Image (cartoon, coloured by chain):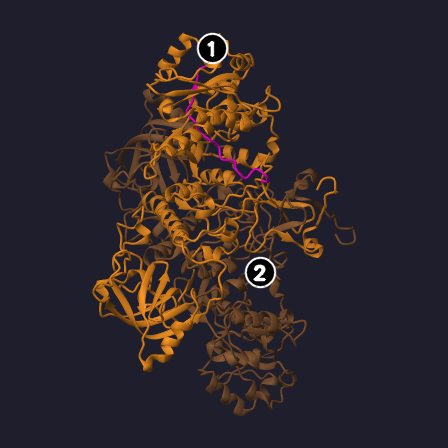
Chain colours: A orange, B brown
């Protein structure tokens, strides 16, 4: 618990004052009214202020108030606009000789200095009201003022319309946090997480349990940070997720667990792992006898497939140069050929390959993909996964192009959720397709209908994994887990050829009466991003790391002298010049 | 979110069912009724069970129920007691030929196996009610049963009265968690934290903000774990507390912040840092002209003092051998002499030194310490801090002795809070008493009345640090922080001779309009310990580390092969034999 504007008199633990708070609707209720069912929190308990800057209205006329805030700007040494997280309020600087010291304080303090003022709420003179400002009907006639802290020259102005570079924002994060947008994002995040907790704890009896972050490496967990201990050669690691602990809690009878957990993934040079989820349609069979060379090529390979997406009204709104730029994008970024087809369009372009689409293929596409007038189909071929990736990306590219032409495809106020289910339990290993690896992780339970296939055709087994997608972005995933020790051992040892010794504690735990169990994890950063419409997850985190994992404010990570590494029995292996 | 007993039909996100939950008072309301003001959570939403084992009462008679739980024990193949977190319930195994398969399942499943049963709630036959069991009026006549998971032979029985070693409990933590006591502790902890969040967020508008755990080292932070990054020679560290970030949030206008934060302290070989807080009285002046040699000795030194505590009714309840064992304890553990004085006792012992206490000293003690008939005073002398430590320890020793004689001194149901204030801002460095170090940390603000002393006699300045003590244990501490950049720079550079470059980002932030601010941090583990009466903080943490920082279940920390250290550019420096 940490707060500012403390008044020594009020400070300490106390029971709620019972004071009736005014219903405030302002910055916090812009998109989601989260606190509609309860009274507004008492923002001025424990502190020297009587009110926040943003809450004063005509109903406060005549009240003596004490406000604390930053000086937003000053006009002609007569008016001052004071700001706190709740909003702005106009303050009238006294001009009388007897108030010379108050005037001096308020006129000399630089912008963004912190002041405390006391005075009376009065009406603005007729005609001087500002309807754009929630506090625009009133102003505060100051009697006393105190400069709490003076501000030096700032690297940028605290105004939302002043554009700053990302690096400058991160370097002076504590100033960037004063912006309306960052205040809104972080406060909304806090309220959303609180709502989730209330739902889970208070309504459904879930138990909030912290699991350790100093743990041991999970098998194959190449993305886990290591932490040297004081025992020579012994290391902890920071877990990627509370994976094993949550299963052990189920075995331990804490049958409804949740946690807002920190997950540590050392992504190294792969900062953008965001998987893309696409609805695509496999039309390989239709093109078995095609004359188009790159389709032929793809279908001759074992994992090869022909895939297509339909761009609704693409023939009407996309120009030839748009289609060309899409094809170039696919060639440059994915080394993939893409073929545009206009199955029902009155308008068409005479591309040489387009001629090679047979009439029965064209009518097949229209039937299978429910093609409408003016739709365009983008067709690609190649290894299944790659073909899916490129079309997923092209779908987003086309949406951008169509929206630039004035179409509204994605309503930012609409939240569309989607469950993705029936994932395969195993995938062939990339480096050795004869062997299997887990599609997600080895603890996912097989689909009950496919249980027998485990012993005959394991590659065909579906899993009980599920992903949750919001507006096209994956926001969470989870699974029903294996609770049978023998099944878990069979999958680990026989099918995946893993060393079961590393997981002996989990196998043992499953053998001691583990109940059937499952769960889900939501990616909080991304979810809040989608809800607030923030362009980057860095805008919903108070102190984010840069793209390369640096803290631009404090310059972490940093060099340490060898003597500080000595207690941990490690030394730096400097790379040879050729490696560096 | 993770839970067990899932039914596939009900699983997923849904709105609360609106079903009226039964008011349950049971295990969770043993000491604190935390959920008295709201309805009980719906523990059986989303899952296959209709009720928990512990909630069934006469009011459920005739209801068809589905229960899931562990087999606690079985009697004569007729009765089964089923357990979940909520309690125990007796289940009647059907004996009819037509239910042979159900009987087989329930009679053959080993104890601690997981079963699901469906049946009817019926009255126990007259005379067979069990008034000691909350569900003792009823039993469930089973119609169908399913073995969800069988249990192997356990390393210990899941019964609270079965004593286990700490090491065994930690190795099989997931079994230990099934005990009533651990379920109670962890569920109460979750509810207490939730109440704190509701108070801070919903009532007082605090914002819950996560601060980074991969940060840079703080100056002098020798107890911070280091984490190698993929950049050669560059390290993050795990912060001991969100120290700097919370101040930066204040500068950033998030003026009411809290966080349930993980703090990482690499305590190495000092696992018990718990400071002792004692009320003592300094009686040095009274003994300036004493004849007692060890008092004379102590007072002749610059930091020397004579200190005393009063043991109420000690002369009545403590025996001569008790006093002797106390003196021996002080001599053995602290190398301190202790002198017992009986200022008003009718009974007395003729110790040689006791004769040397002058009459005016005796009456002085009676006046200053408000001595009652039968009180005994323990007197010691020496360096101020050491004398305080020994008396603090002796006070607890005497309390143990008196309680063993039948006195009730410390009511376990009573919560006594105490604020400790007016700490010194600086202390002389132990290794070099001519220089100063911070008593807590260099960001603590000086007491406003002592501000001028900073420039003349800094060692006399009091701080605005405060500690919160519950039943004699420190449960939290905090301070008003310095918000003036120049004052902070003066204390760091001039008084403490620290390298200010390491904190340039903080000094810069203070200069950009930092509001006055302060806060407090509570030690959650210790607080929950005191509330639940748990003997160790390991009993209020789901997966604690052992005394030496080991995870006995998974055996972390562990050895890693050199190739896994390569991406982090470190190698192990094995200690030479002589060091090991």
Q: CA distance from mark 1 to mark 2?
A: 80 Å
Can residue B259 be seen by looking at this rendering? yes
Expressed as whole percent of the image width and height from the top left, the position of residue A5 reads 39, 67
Q: Which residue is more in the foreground, B278 or B192?
A: B192
Q: Which residue is more in the foreground, A514 or A294?
A: A294
SS type, badge 1: helix
Magenta span has A269? yes
Expressed as whole percent of the image width and height from the top left, the position of residue B569 reads 68, 44
Q: Is residue A95 left or right of residue A425?
A: left
Magenta residues, as a range?
A268-285
Say which residue label 1 marks: A356
Write down the chain letter for disc 2.
Answer: B
**In contact (CB < 8 Å): disc 1 and disc 2:** no
Say which residue label 2 marks: B272
B393 lies above or below A368? below
B273 lies above or below B107? below
């Amino acid at each position: 618990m940490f707060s500012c504007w403390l008044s020594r008199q009020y400070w300490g633990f106390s029971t709620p004052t019972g004071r009736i708070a005014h219903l405030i609707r302002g910055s916090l209720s812009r998109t989601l009214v989260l606190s509609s069912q309860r009274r507004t929190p008492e923002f001025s308990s424990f502190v020297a202020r009587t009110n926040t800057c943003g809450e004063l209205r005509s109903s406060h006329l005549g009240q003596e108030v004490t406000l604390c805030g930053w000086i937003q700007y000053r006009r002609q040494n007569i008016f001052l606009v004071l700001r706190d997280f709740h909003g702005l309020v106009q303050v009238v600087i006294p001009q009388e000789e007897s108030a010379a010291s108050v005037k001096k304080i308020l006129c000399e303090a630089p912008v963004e200095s912190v002041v405390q003022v006391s005075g009376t709420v009065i009406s603005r003179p007729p005609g001087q009201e500002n309807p754009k400002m929630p506090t625009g009907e009133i102003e505060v006639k100051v009697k006393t003022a105190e400069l709490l802290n003076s501000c030096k020259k700032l690297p940028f102005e605290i105004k939302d319309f002043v554009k700053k570079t990302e690096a400058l924002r991160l370097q002076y994060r504590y100033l960037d946090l004063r912006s309306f947008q960052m205040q809104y994002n972080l406060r909304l995040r806090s309220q959303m997480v609180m709502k989730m907790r209330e739902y889970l704890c208070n309504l459904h009896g879930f138990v909030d349990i912290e699991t350790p972050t100093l743990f041991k490496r999970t098998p194959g967990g190449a993305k886990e940070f290591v932490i040297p201990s004081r025992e020579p050669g012994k290391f902890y690691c920071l877990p990627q997720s509370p994976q094993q602990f949550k299963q052990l809690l189920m075995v331990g009878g804490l049958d409804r667990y949740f946690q807002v957990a920190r997950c540590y993934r050392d992504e190294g040079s792969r900062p953008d792992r965001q998987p893309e989820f696409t609805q695509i349609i496999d039309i390989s069979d239709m093109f078995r006898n095609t004359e188009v060379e790159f389709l032929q090529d793809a279908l001759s390979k074992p994992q090869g497939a022909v895939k297509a997406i339909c761009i609704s009204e693409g023939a009407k709104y996309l120009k030839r140069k748009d289609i060309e730029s899409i094809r170039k994008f696919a060639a440059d970024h994915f080394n993939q050929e893409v073929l545009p087809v206009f199955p029902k369009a009155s308008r068409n372009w005479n591309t040489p390959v387009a001629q090679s689409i047979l009439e029965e293929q064209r009518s097949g596409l229209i039937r299978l993909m429910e093609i409408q007038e003016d739709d365009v189909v983008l067709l690609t071929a190649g290894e299944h996964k790659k073909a899916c990736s490129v079309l997923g990306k092209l779908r987003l590219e086309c949406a951008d192009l169509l929206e630039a032409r004035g179409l509204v495809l994605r309503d930012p106020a609409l939240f569309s959720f989607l469950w993705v289910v029936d994932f395969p339990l195993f995938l062939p290993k990339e480096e050795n397709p004869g062997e299997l690896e887990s599609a997600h992780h080895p603890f996912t339970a097989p689909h009950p209908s496919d249980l027998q296939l485990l012993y005959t055709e394991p590659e065909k087994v579906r899993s009980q994994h599920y992903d949750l997608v919001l507006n096209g972005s994956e926001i969470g995933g989870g699974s029903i887990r294996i609770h049978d020790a023998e099944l878990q051992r069979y999958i680990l040892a026989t099918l995946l050829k893993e060393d079961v010794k590393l997981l002996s504690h989990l196998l043992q735990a499953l053998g001691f009466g583990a109940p059937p169990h499952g769960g889900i994890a939501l990616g909080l950063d991304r979810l809040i991003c989608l809800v607030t419409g923030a362009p980057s997850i860095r805008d919903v985190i108070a102190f984010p790391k840069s793209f390369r994992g640096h803290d631009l404010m404090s310059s972490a990570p940093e060099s340490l002298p060898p003597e500080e590494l000595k207690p941990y029995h490690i030394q730096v292996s400097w790379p040879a010049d050729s490696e560096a």
